[in-house]
Amino acid sequence: MARIEWAQLCEKAFVDDCDRLCLIGITTRMPVPSLPNAVHQLMIVARVVELRVRETIDVGVSITTPSGHCPSPNDPDCLDIEVVADSHPGDAERPSIG
């Protein structure tokens, strides 16, 4: 069964031309003086392991305040998901996240 081995919050993440994962502005704490708070770009990078070919998994992400409030944006286009698989010789298909 697939599982998330680790996840990291950062300002920007990408895979460079040498297939190296690059994380910029790794976030270790996120002070929010008041809500609502506008965040222009924030990325969550996660390593999913033990995922089999053609297996799909559901992933959910939320932010909860210390008082238990769970703010959510009204714009459906405010979220973008990109899947980048580790390349292994002989892999015919990439797993998908749904």
Image (tube, grey):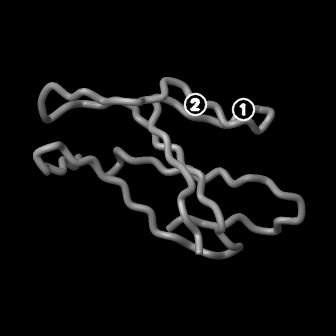
Q: Residue at x 39, y 47 (%)?
A: 79
Marking on residue 23:
2
Q: Secondary structure at mark 1?
A: loop
Percent position of residue 45, x then y: 53, 44
Percent position of residue 80, x then y: 45, 47
Q: Residue at x 27, y 47 (%)?
A: 63
Percent position of residue 83, x then y: 60, 53
Relative horizontal placement of residue 6, taking residue 41 as reference (left or right)? right
Image quarter (top left, top right, bottom left or bottom right) of the N terminus: bottom right
In which image quadrant can residue 54 be found?
bottom right
In the rendered image, the residue lying farthest to the right is: 90
Q: Is residue 57 above or below residue 80?
A: below
* Residue that label 1 marks: 16
In which image quadrant can residue 31 be found?
top left
Q: Is residue 75 above or below residue 30?
A: below
Q: Secondary structure at mark 2?
A: strand
Of labels 2 and 1, earlier in sequence is: 1
- Could you say which is closer to the camera, residue 94 or residue 66? 66
- Could you say which is closer to the camera, residue 65 or residue 37? 65
